[in-house]
Amino acid sequence: MKGAARPFFILAVCYAVAGMVLGIAMAAMHDHTQMPTHAHIMVAGFLMSSVFAFFYHLFPEIGSRPMARIHFYVQAISGVVLVASLFVLLQGTEQIEPVTALASIGFLAGMLLFIWNARPVLRAA
Ligand code: HEM
Ligand code: HEM
């Protein structure tokens, strides 16, 4: 794996381990308060990062562009802040909500960057 594919794949496996540890902790403690955090780490984190990794692996000429790196940093930073602040929010610290909201917008911006990067594939139908 080259270009942006590799960091996205590394990010995906980190999300997977963190999300599963949280899932096991929730199950063990019979406390599902953090269910939305677990769900977003697994699906928005692990699964989406895996999709980005395999996309950039399939299209290495796109994955090696600087814009693919920029996409990685925007998606990774906003995603980690999103799930970390959601965790804190659900623990009861409501003042952190604006951080979660900003991170959500950053996460959407990441998705829009991905669509921008995927233009050649979208066009060549
Ligand atoms: C170590 C493995 C895992 C454990 C122990 C675990 C545990 C849990 C628990 C306890 C819940 C809360 C259920 C509820 O309150 O109704 C949950 C929900 C959820 N999990 Fe996991 N999970 C694991 C792996 C995964 C994986 C691999 C994914 C996806 C790739 C995933 C995605 C979800 C989602 C989307 C929900 C929310 C379901 C809903 O909306 O009802 N989990 N999980
Ligand atoms: C802009 C970022 C996002 C925001 C602000 C957001 C917000 C939300 C909200 C408010 C809920 C309802 C939670 C509840 O009822 O307790 C939810 C649920 C869910 N979202 Fe997201 N979401 C985002 C991105 C995503 C993405 C990208 C995915 C998957 C690729 C996803 C997958 C899910 C799933 C599986 C659930 C059901 C599990 C649960 O209830 O926690 N979300 N989301």
Image: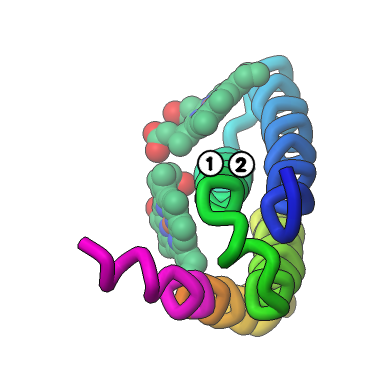
Label 1 neighbour load within 10 Å: few <14, some 14-19, many 20+: some
Label 2 neighbour load within 10 Å: few <14, some 14-19, many 20+: many
Looking at the image, is 52 positioned above or below residue 20? below
Q: Secondary structure at mark 2?
A: helix
Residue displayed at 42% across by 73% down:
115
Rounded to the nearest angstrom, the CA distance separating label 2 from label 1 is 4 Å
Give the quarter of the image for residue 68. Answer: bottom right
Using residue 118 as the reference point, say whether residue 124 is left or right of it. left
Q: Is mark 2 within 8 Å of ligand 1?
A: yes
Of residues 117 and 73, which is closer to you in this image?
A: 117
Q: How many marks?
A: 2
Q: Is mark 1 within 8 Å of ligand 1?
A: yes
The image quadrant where one finds the N terminus is: top right
Is residue 121 located in the magenta-colored stretch of the structure? yes
Using residue 88 as the reference point, say whether residue 102 is left or right of it. left
Q: Amino acid at mark 2?
A: Phe
The image quadrant where one finds the C terminus is: bottom left
- Can see residue 61? yes
Point out residue 41 in the picture as x, y percentages from the top left corner: 62, 45
| Residues tagged 2 and 1 counted as in contact (Cβ below 8 A) | yes
Residue pointed to by mark 1: 47
Give the quarter of the image for residue 82. Answer: bottom right
Of residues 113 and 105, which is closer to you in this image?
A: 113
Point out residue 81 in the picture as x, y percentages from the top left corner: 74, 67
Of residues 2 and 47, which is closer to you in this image?
A: 2
Is residue 69 located in the magenta-colored stretch of the structure? no
Using residue 121 as the reference point, say whether residue 26 is left or right of it. right
Q: Secondary structure at mark 1?
A: helix
Q: Residue furthest left?
A: 125
Residue displayed at 65% across by 79% down:
67
Residue pointed to by mark 2: 46
- Residues drawn in magenta: 113-125
